[in-house]
Amino acid sequence: MSRILKKYLGVLAALPFLLTPAISGAFEFPTFAAGIGLTGASVHTLGTETDPEGTKNDEKIYDSAAVEYPSIFGEVRFNIVDRFGMTVGLSVIPGKAEFVTESKPDQDLTSTAGGTSTGISTVKGKISEHVTLYIQPTVRLTDIFSVYLTAGISKMDVEASAQLVTSTDFTKTKSIDGTRFGVGVMAESANGFFIKLEGNASEYDDVSFTTSDSTVAKADIDEESVSVLLGKAF
């Protein structure tokens, strides 16, 4: 986590110095903000399994789970012109969150004579090391209220734990990337305290795991979320 966080923090810290010389006439000196958030999300996972011979299992695993998780964030805010601004931020989800637990009846061919073994295949998934770097074009409607759009890139680790009838059990972790798009509204007081309410949709790269007998398990992960964020601008 520290290596990933240092990389994104380095990019975030460098942005004010990279942007200001290019458009110094438009920007005022940037302000900084930090805070915490609470997110309620619906995470959708579509899983497929392909056996060593290349045959895809027709019975897909689909799971839609409701999850809640906290986050911490830091932002650099630029006032570009009049009531239009640009925010560049970094959001980190601490710890782990389970996003899928799914079981299904399964069977496996055990001999050329047609013998089969039957049972229940179970797959569990957890995310960790989740970091999002984002930008938010912002329009200040009044001295208190603003609206903004969000576009960001995310990186996280996915841990899959599977007990399979058709293959060997495994627990593996892989890193994947994703994108985030959303919209939000912010209310900010004169002393810098603010609250944000935002909705986001995130889409992640497919993640695949290969067992010791060359069975391939693949998952496609999407998320829709609503977040409440509290913070202070400096």
Image (cartoon, rainbow, N blue to C red):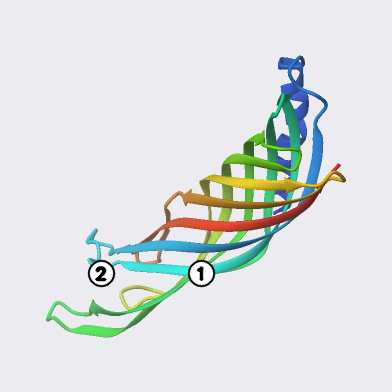
Taking the view exactly as shown, the residue that stands out farthest to the front is 142
- Does 27 sit above or below residue 101? above
User: Which label was assigned to residue 25?
Assistant: none
Answer above or below: position of 79 versus 4: above
Marks 1/2 in contact by CB < 8 Å: the verdict is no
Q: In this view, does 186 lie above or below 127?
A: above
x and y, in percent, of residue 98 in the image: 55, 70
Q: Is residue 4 visible?
A: no
Residue 33 in sight in this render: yes
Q: In this view, does 200 lie to the left or right of 214?
A: right
Q: Is residue 103 left or right of residue 142?
A: left
Residue 26 at what x, y percent from top left? 73, 18
Q: How far is mark 1 from mark 2, CA to CA?
A: 23 Å
Q: For mark 1, does the 10 Å Cα neighbourhood hold few (<14), some (14 to 19), or many (20 or more) residues?
A: some
Quadrant containing the N terminus is: bottom right
* Residue drawn where x is 76% and y is 37% of the image: 76
Q: How crowded is mark 2: few (under 14 residues within 10 Å), some or many (20 or more)?
A: few
Q: Where is residue 162 in the image (x, y as percent from the top left)?
A: 44, 73
Outermost residue, left side: 113
Q: Mark 1 belongs to which amino acid?
A: Ala
Image location (x, y in percent) of residue 212: 40, 66
Q: Which residue, given by chain and number where applicable, does mark 2 sit on?
A: 59
The residue type indicated by label 2 comes to: Glu
* Residue picked out by circle 1: 66
Give the residue displayed 71% in from the left and 35% down from the top.
Answer: 11
Q: Is mark 2 on a helix, strand or loop?
A: loop
Name the residue rendered at 46%, 50% in the picture.
203
Label 1 or label 2, whichever lies nearer to me, is: 1
